[in-house]
Amino acid sequence: MKIIKDNSTVKSSGYTIATIGYFDGIHLGHKKIINELVKQAKQKDGTSILITFWPHPRTVLEANSEIEFLLSNSEKIKFLEEEGLDLIYLIEFTWEFSKIEANDFIQNYLVEKLDIDKLVIGYNHNFGYKREGNYNFLEKNREKFEFDIQEIKKKEIDENLNISSSDIRK
């Protein structure tokens, strides 16, 4: 598994499937997304990419908040490698980066830097300035960005559980 910093452009020769998130704790929802990513990449002899951030967005956006991480970076990387993920694309999360609108994030990272063929996200995933990006936003702009989208629905994980790293920390 490779780890690449966000100033790099990744052009794979084949099919590229990605997901986005911090992935602290690697709970059931994260596992489902990662397993789906790896499975589909292997089926198409492609590349699976996890786009993540450092430091944790809340440490930048809520400077006074203390976050208890569920996994260290090395534990997270070890788990992701064991799951068969091909690449981690690490973006430095800064105050300036937090102001990037969903549309620009997609264009700059998913289209131009990574040239993805498909994006897999969880049912409760949001991204971009003011968390404006989500599955509905992606679906509405599908043709503009020319990549497929898959939402892992709550019922595909466990309909009776609300799964999030924030809930696990409580």
Image (tube, helix red, strand yellow):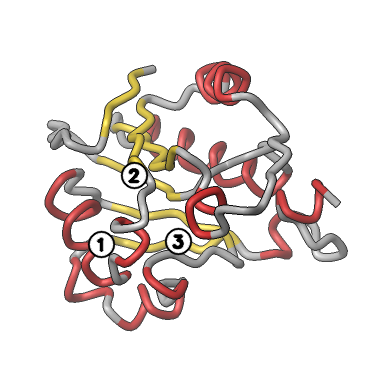
Residue 15: which numbered mark, if any? none
85 in relation to 96, above or below: above
Which amino acid, mark 3?
Gln
Q: 10 Å neighbourhood of mark 2: few (<14), some, or many (≥20)?
A: many
Q: Secondary structure at mark 1?
A: helix
Q: Is residue 37 left or right of residue 122?
A: left
Residue 22 position, x and y percent, is: 52, 44
Which residue shows up at 80% across the image and 47% down it?
Answer: 169
Q: 10 Å neighbourhood of mark 1: few (<14), some, or many (≥20)?
A: some
Which residue shows up at 12% across the image and 52% down it?
Answer: 112
Residue 89 position, x and y percent, is: 33, 35
**Residue extending farthest front:** 64
158 in relation to 16, above or below: below
Which amino acid, mark 2?
Ile
Residue of label 3: 150
> How much space separates mark 3 and mark 1, taking CA atoms?
15 Å
Q: Is residue 96 left or right of residue 151?
A: left
10 in relation to 108, above or below: above
Residue of label 2: 17
Q: Secondary structure at mark 3?
A: strand
Q: Secondary structure at mark 2?
A: strand
Q: Is residue 27 left or right of residue 72?
A: right
Placement of the N terminus among the 4 image quadrants: top left
Residue 29 position, x and y percent, is: 67, 49
| Mark toward the viewer: 2 or 1 | 1
N-terminal of the two: label 3 or label 1? 1
Residue of label 1: 106
Camera-side residue of 40 and 1: 1
N-terminal of the two: label 2 or label 1? 2
Which residue shows up at 35% across the image and 27% down it?
Answer: 87
